[in-house]
Amino acid sequence: QYSNPDAFEFLSDGVNQERVNDYLAQIGRALCFSVDRKAIFCGYRDQATPEAKTAIRAHFYKTVNHLEPLINFLMVSIITGDTGRPVNTGDVIVESSLLSAIENSAANTKLLEKLARGALVNSKASEPRAMLKSVMNRLKEMGYFITIGHSDLKYRATGKWSALYDTMAFIKEHESAAFGEVGETQESLL
């Protein structure tokens, strides 16, 4: 809805969905929507095929490996935000406001440092402003945010957050099977 509004509007129309699904069926794919219907993505029509199982498993493990840093970012957004909730699709993050809230708390600065220096971002920055910029740039590269306005100081959360929340709900629902592979750190965060 935010990263590609024209495509989202087109695919929100039932007639267009049907036409696109008919086309995608030729390659074994189908349109999928996040639970909150704020994100549309392409998925496998038949998830039982070996190709689909392999691709889904790879995507799942990639997401699981990124869970801890993403949850750390969500914790920063809860602690420092005005709403008292984690970032959601469509939310606007203003870098200066986030930085101000982080710098006013040693615990928040430590959390930012952990996030920035972790494997997902791998920043060598030592100042909170540079660390936050590294984190936001990495999340933008991964598709979780787009910049709005004419500077890189305001970000809008994309539907990728909706897809992440759906994945987290799936993991929570199936945690006995999933956490044998995920580890205690991610389990405790969920």
Image (cartoon, helix red, strand yellow):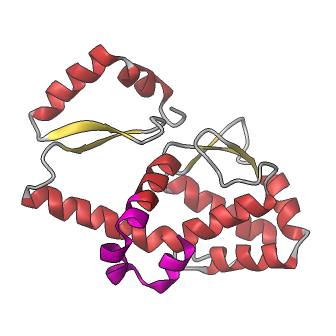
182 w.r.t. 92: above or below? below
Whether residue 100 sits left or right of residue 42 in the image: it is right
Q: Which residues are magenta?
A: 170-190
Q: How many marks?
A: 0
Residue 153 seen in the figure: yes
Whether residue 102 sits left or right of residue 183 in the image: it is right
The residue positioned 48% from the left and 39% from the top of the image is 36
Residue 162 covered by magenta stretch: no
Q: Main secondary structure of the magenta part?
A: helix
Q: Quadrant of residue 84?
A: bottom right
Residue 127 seen in the figure: no
Whether residue 41 sits left or right of residue 109 in the image: it is left
The residue positioned 47% from the left and 85% from the top of the image is 184
87 w.r.t. 179: above or below? above
Q: Quadrant of residue 147?
A: top right
Q: Position of residue 1 (x, y in %)?
A: 50, 32
Residue nearest the observer in this picture, 99 or 37:
37
The residue positioned 17% from the left and 64% from the top of the image is 54
Q: Position of residue 22 (x, y in %)?
A: 15, 25
Q: Position of residue 140 (x, y in %)?
A: 56, 53
Residue 182 covered by magenta stretch: yes
Residue nearest the observer in this picture, 106 or 47:
47
